[in-house]
Image (cartoon, helix red, strand yellow):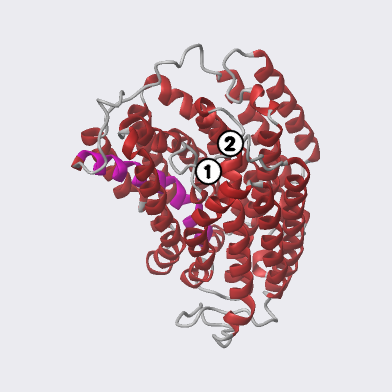
Amino acid sequence: MTGSDSVRLKTPRGRWIVAATVLGSSLAMLDATVVNVALPDIGRDFGSGVSGLQWTVSAYTLTLASFILLGGALGDRLGRRTVFVWGTIWFAVASVLCGLAPNIEVLVAARLLQGVGAALLTPGSLALISASIHPDDRGAAIGLWSGLGGVASAVGPLLGGWLVDVAGWRSVFLLNIPLAVAVVLVAVKHVPESRDPHAEGKLDLPGAGVVALALGLLTYGFIDASWWVVAAGVLAVGAFVVVELRTSNPLIPPSLFASRVFLAANLVTFAVYAALGGVFFLLILQLQLALDYSPIAAGVATLPITALMLVLSARAGRVAQRIGPRVPMTVGPLVAAAGLLLMLRISPGGAGVEPAGTTGSGAGVRPASTYLVDVLPAVVVFGLGLSILVAPLTGAVLGAVSTDRAGTASGVNNAVARTSQLLAVAALPGLVGIAGADYDQPQTFSDGFHTAMIVCAGLLVVGSLIAAVMVRSPSRKNPTYSCDPSSPALSPREQI
């Protein structure tokens, strides 16, 4: 679509385009946050061990990480609106299967299907804005998309907790149905179709198949502590690298990694987002299982993280644009690691408790003021670290490549983030001694949680060291770093 054919943001159609893309991306994002709040109830309902909860989260991330780049390529060729709409429909049908699942096995299978739908609709969300909105309004539209999505991110845990308390965990999935219907109706009526006229060659289906196999083997091997399966997964990763080096249209162009900064930024992403995957999976469980928080209280307890990112991420991006990404990418993970060490104070025998004005399931309720002493400082410091880090990290990825490759670079970085989170959720509980029905043993689970927070803090320190050693801030005479809000990068809330 040319500039003369594109839509102005202030027109009704422009607003409908933004509404459709925000609702679509929020579908995938909400499922990644809301489901975590429902995990204890799912485990109790199905009599599932910790591995069942791991698979409930990992199945969705597995197919999303495996096929998100393929979903973007399909949209470029078949039509971004078409793939976005069909991805939304696919996601909705899979959500129905999740909500009606009679056992944990069916739920996991439905989550696998749900991740495929998310992989189809997620890349199209931002691509439709870039392709449809007039260039003069594109930056404002992307800012609106990011801001409204941030609101959805903040509401997600609270909404999920409320739904679990009021209507049960199945309502968390069935909520997607009316939202998906609204997305499809608005997209079909108001969003113009667009394709990439320069997209050519065959899709890298072998690459997508091999990476899905590799991630599936690694996930299964880590969750079941089957190390020969893990070894097979590592070999499959090697096979994926060979496929990408030999194909003419690779999902992950190897030439991107010729840039030292791009390589460094993705190594930092892998380390940091592995830590985030472990924290966001285990923290909600710790609050509910070890401290007897209700689902809604657990959601409220973590809201400061999202609130800080909404308020501070844009400012951190502007600072990084002036001084370069090295300092914030080094300091941010260290601050976040300090927040995780503060989480060692959160334990059944400690002072952790529900925020004021909320109540748990009854047993072991502690004075509300102690939330301010143990839980709040930890999540605030952790949120500050993420606020310092995430926008400069995204900017470093974009600034390391030419403008015409920014979309591909952002997609690769997003896939790296999803993959590291997937592997962390699969591997970390077993490594720290959380297995079986440990969620019925508050002290046992809490001991594992504390070990996991130390491991995750170590991953954040590794990310900081990589940034300090490998990332170089640009000189004033030759600036290469960009954090332009109109760049086609995924926002911090999308990656988190």
Name the kind of residue labelled 2 in the image: Gly
Q: Position of residue 248 (x, y in %)?
A: 59, 12
Report helix, strand or loop for mark 2. Answer: helix
Q: Viewer-proximal residue, 18 or 429? A: 18
Give the class, few, some or many, for how many residues have Cα within 10 Å of label 2's Cα (few <14, many ≥20).
many
**Residue 298: which disc?**
none
Q: Position of residue 282 (x, y in %)?
A: 63, 61
Q: Is residue 61 visible?
A: yes
Does residue 459 belong to the magenta stretch? no
Residue toward you, 408 or 239: 408
Q: Earlier in the sequence, mark 2 or mark 1?
A: 2
Query: Is the magenta region chiefly helix, strand or loop?
Result: helix
Q: Which mark is residue 399?
A: 2
In the displayed structure image, the side of residue 232 where residue 160 appears, left or right: left
The spot of residue 367 in percent (x, y) is 57, 88
Q: Residues within 10 Å of mark 1 (few under 14, many from 20)?
A: many
Q: Which residues are magenta?
A: 13-38
Instruction: Name the residue at 43% across, 59% down.
Output: 156
Residue 102 shows in the view: no
Which residue is depicted at the point 61% across and 41% down? 396
Reply above or below: 402 against 378: above
The image shows residue 228, relative to residue 203, as above or below, that is below
User: Whole-Å distance between the Cαs marked 2 and 1?
Assistant: 7 Å
Q: Is residue 93 left or right of residue 398?
A: left
Residue at 57% from the left image edge and 58% from the top image edge: 387
Whole-percent x and y of residue 468? 75, 48
Q: Is residue 263 above or below residue 494?
A: above
Identify which amino acid the numbered label 1 is placed on. Answer: Cys
Q: Are marks 2 and 1 in contact (CB under 8 Å)?
A: yes
Query: Which quarter of the figure has residue 15?
Result: top left
Which residue position is annotated with label 1? 483
